Image (cartoon, coloured by chain):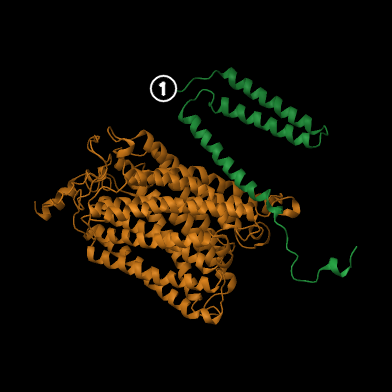
Amino acid sequence: MASAKIVPVRTYILTFIALLVLLGVTTGVAYIHLGIGNTVIALVIAFVKMLLVLLFFMHLFYDKGIKRLAFAVGLLWLAILIVLSSADVFTRHWTPVPRGWGPDISLQQGPK
Amino acid sequence: MSVAVAELATRSRVHYLNESYGVKSWLLTTDHKRIAILYMVSITFMFLVGACAAALMRIQLLEPAGAIVQPETYNKLFSIHGIIMVWFFLIPSIPAVLGNFLIPMMIGARDVAFPKLNLLSWYIYIIGACFILYTLIYGGVDTGWTFYTPYSSTYSNSHVFGAAAGVFIVGFSSILTGLNFIVTVHKMRAPGMTWFRLPLFIWSLYATSIVLVLATPVLAITLSLMAMERFLHIGIFNPAIGGDPLLFQHLFWFYSHPAVYIMVLPAMGVISELVAAYSRRRVYGYAFVAFSSFAIALIAFLVWGHHMFVSGQSVYAGMVFSALSFLVAIPSGIKVFNWTATLYKGSNSYDAPMLYALGFLGLFTMGGLTGLFLASLSIDVHLHDTYFVIAHFHYIMVGGSVMAYMGGLHYWWPKMTGRLYPDKWARFAAFTIFIGFNLTFFPQYILGYLGMLRRYAVYPAQFQALNVLSSAGASILGVGYFIPLVYLIWSMRYGREAGPNPWRAKGLEWETASPPPRENFEETPIVTEEAYAYPTRPRAVRV
């Protein structure tokens, strides 16, 4: 295709090395106990790795217009899946559970 | 020109059917028209297999205690019926057969953008179908077409792997077809074929393709996760090992609800073409009908939770999904009202394709309106998993999609084969299908409302009369489908020569010969007019 940019091999190698370094950091951090921080750091590193792959291996850094739009639509669809599923997961416990018609245990035990 | 001379002229002309002969010339073809024919033969075979399963189910339900098979076998019958009819017939039906055949011709192109990928998608379909047939022959699967966990991932002893693998594989066929259509519509339009000159069939197929490409990967992911839990015991859906018990249903319906629109959006595209051709008018509100396809495609992704109202899903999420589900009625209503407005004061003729289109209008509307019942939170508690649901989605999928597929097949049959079918038989079959369909599925609305649950091999005796009525209707429906199979095959050899445009319809596909040459057009057409540019009738002069 006429508009495709020729990316130097050096860029691919540098991206690959960056991915390996980030892999090493992920593994290293897993051995340090940081509580919830472990998950946060792992997710941030995963996000950065995803960006590297998208931008350089998949050429999104060099592409404009409709290709970026296509990618954005994909992300939007993923967001719909996650947000509406979360609407269930995070509100499941809000509903009060009715006591039912059986004898009220608290009354049988008498006033405290 | 006499008939004999015309026949001789067609036989001596080189077209896509006679340019080469032999099995190899078909199995290695990259011609979109031949691939469409390959798909047509394949999905017809799978339809027959799925229909046999349905016939056995209807025989079983003639008696309250079950007439012929064990409950375990009955579970396998409805599972294989659903799996085959959804993934191996309905989803590929209009896109892969009519879409493949027509999209390049309607936009003035020689072929789709990626002809080899097109052939690959058919081979992938065949591999998927082989897995399903293997599953069927070696004992079947009993999970239902929905593969719900934990039954599919933990308890079922049937051939879950074979069935899930078949569905997983056939998904890639859908993705390749969708990708091909998107690029074809963007890149291959003839000079002058602007977006707003495209036939509405193309708009529908384009919206369908976007859904195919975006939704189908989620199905593959879902089935992979189910397999990982079943075979590797990784906790994804099982709460005992760290999973979420509703996650499977969320993921499955995130694909499978849009899949309903994968089945019905192309049908809507066919109806737009039929209504315009047989009322000899431009579709009323062209742009609204075009954009309503996109509205449906978008809203399709926002409503999946209405399948889960009684699953234990949060009631707050249920409220959101219920409200969003009602939105689908708006673009669907736009289409139905605009088709009706097109028919109003049109020069209507009632050939067989138009009968199917009119059947679609009524049946789809009934299916759609009963969908609103089911989208209502409180009513769904009563109707969930009853025959009311079965009747609802058969009105959409059979009354809607299959009617449109049959209508489209009759409308474009002369283009595909160069021959006309016997019109009287075709009208008779259309009426038979309409009557048989309603006799089969209308009683199921009542059965469901009265409380008969789906997926049971036995039922209380008071439901027998309606079940017998439904089974009797199914036999009429079966005859209705068998008649076209006979006369369409007959017409390929004995039918009258069709000529390029037997219906005097508008559209680029009618401007080339029937059957078309390998390259579709002798020279690339230049488009200078709107879609459906039928001559307008002179206005009545008021005195």
Q: Which residue is mark 1?
A: A2
Q: Position of residue B498 (x, y in %)?
A: 20, 53
The quarter of the image holding the N terminus of chain A is top left
Residue A27, visible in the rendered structure:
yes
Give the side of residue B342 with respect to residue B437, left or right.
left
Q: Nearer the viewer, residue B265 or A1?
A: B265
Up the image or down, B517 lies above or below A50; here it is below
What color is chain B drawn in? orange
Nearer to us in this view, B424 or B487: B424
**As drawn, which residue projects farthest toward the left?**
B1
In what quadrant of the picture does the C terminus of chain A appear?
Answer: bottom right
The residue at 54%/44% (across/down) is B217
Residue B185 vertical placement versus B307 (above, below): above
Foreground residue among B101 and B374: B374
In the rendered image of the structure, the colour used to display chain A is green
Q: Secondary structure at mark 1?
A: loop
Please tell me which residue is depicted at 54% across the width and 63% down the height of the picture. B79
Q: Residue at x 37, y 43 (%)?
A: B203
Mark 1 residue type: Ala
B443 lies above or below B185: below
Mark 1 closeness class: few <14, some 14–19, many ≥20 residues within 10 Å = few
The chain letter for the residue carrying disc 1 is A
Image check: A71 left or right of B43?
right
